[in-house]
Amino acid sequence: MRSSVRTLAAVAAAALLCVIPGVAQADPGPVAGECRSFSFPVPQGQLASTLCLPSAPTDTLMVLMSGSNYNGTYWDFHYQPETYNFRRAMNAAGFATLIVDRLGNGASTHPPSVTLTATATAQALHEIVQTARRGIAGAQPFGKVVTVGHSLTSGTSVIEATTHHDVDGVLLTGYSHALNISETIGVISTYYQAANDPVFAGQNLDPGYLTSRPGTRMQDFHGEGNVDPEVLAIDERTKETFSLTEYPDGLTSTLPGMSSLITAPVLIVNGGRDRLSCGTNYSICRDSATLQAAEAPFFGPSAKLQAFVLPGSGHSVNLARNTVAYHRAVIDWMNSTVRQ
């Protein structure tokens, strides 16, 4: 009888430890095959982050950071995920992923827009890489970390890689040294104050926060005939904010010189109809070999440069109808070059 009483008391005490506020509990860490969302602290606030693990153990993490017009939805697209979900495809291939929204973007902190810069984002990316190697969000330390950028954050990845030399691979999408200036100015001309857009109603964003005008994303970011109408509608509903102050230093990564200092393997991916990154008349994106030949002079031998062109896609390769071919190219590169 006394033994039963003692047993019941022990069970009750253990239960109380689980619910009493302030009692520290051991964090079991993320579970294989599941995702965990958390905030990553930086000097200006918090970066909204989501870590997803594959079903089997891995020592390789891909850090996915959204570009200027997108948030984490771009990487973790829920419509027809078997086609459009990049995060899920990488997890299925055996890689862990960490999706991060930039400051002033998505669920991350929105500081005064004039304080946002690509250099500060690159420093935050560096801190994330270092933390991942020690163990982030309760996960085991990752031995290999690859940065994955889109458009503006491809520039951020170049800045981080050339400053700190601490990554094992750099995937650049919507990026090249043949930036089409006139087309870029044309895209910028479609931006307006986010506070005037219904998507951001009630968010009290300062005037420096911009977004794309309704109805402009098809021409700016997609290839004609290569986008599902529902994808385009979701793209409009989930569009994001940014500040033009992020562009000056972000675009320095497309100038000759900087990328030659990257000492990790690099894969460049562009859509064949990317009006921003394919040069005049899409000249450098005719096919993968043409893109590689055009970009090779800007990288050193340590980059082991590879390139892939997704035919018919615009700037946002994750959202093209044929994006699965791009997923396969990335997985092949990860297995053949990064995992070696």
Image (cartoon, rainbow, N blue to C red):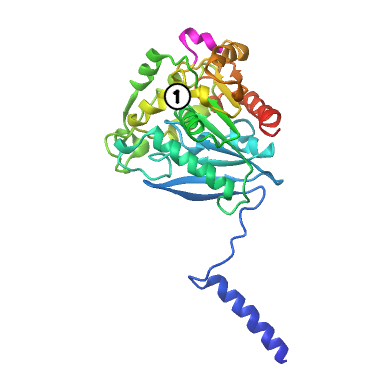
Magenta span main SS? helix
Residue that appears at 56% across and 74% down: 17
* Amino acid found under the numbered disc labelled 1: Ser
Seen from the viewer's position, the closer of residues 274 and 223 is 274
The part of the chain drawn in magenta is: 278-285
Which element type, helix, strand or loop, lies under badge 1?
helix
Tell me if residue 301 comes above or below residue 167 in the rendering: above
In the image, farthest residue toward the left: 207
Tell me if residue 229 comes above or below residue 88 in the rendering: above
Percent x, y of residue 26: 59, 64
Q: Which part of the image, by quadrant, shows the N terminus?
A: bottom right
Percent x, y of residue 277: 48, 17
Specify the quadrant of the image occupied by residue 211: top left
Q: Which residue is mark 1?
A: 253
Residue that appears at 50% across and 22% down: 175
Percent x, y of residue 199: 37, 37
The question of residue 280 being in magenta is answered with yes
Percent x, y of residue 327: 63, 28
- Numbered circles on residues, count: 1
Seen from the viewer's position, the closer of residues 267 and 150 is 267
Question: How many residues crowd around disc 1 within 10 Å: few (fewer than 14), some, or many (20 or more)?
Answer: many
Seen from the viewer's position, the closer of residues 40 and 109 is 40
Residue that appears at 40% across and 40% down: 103
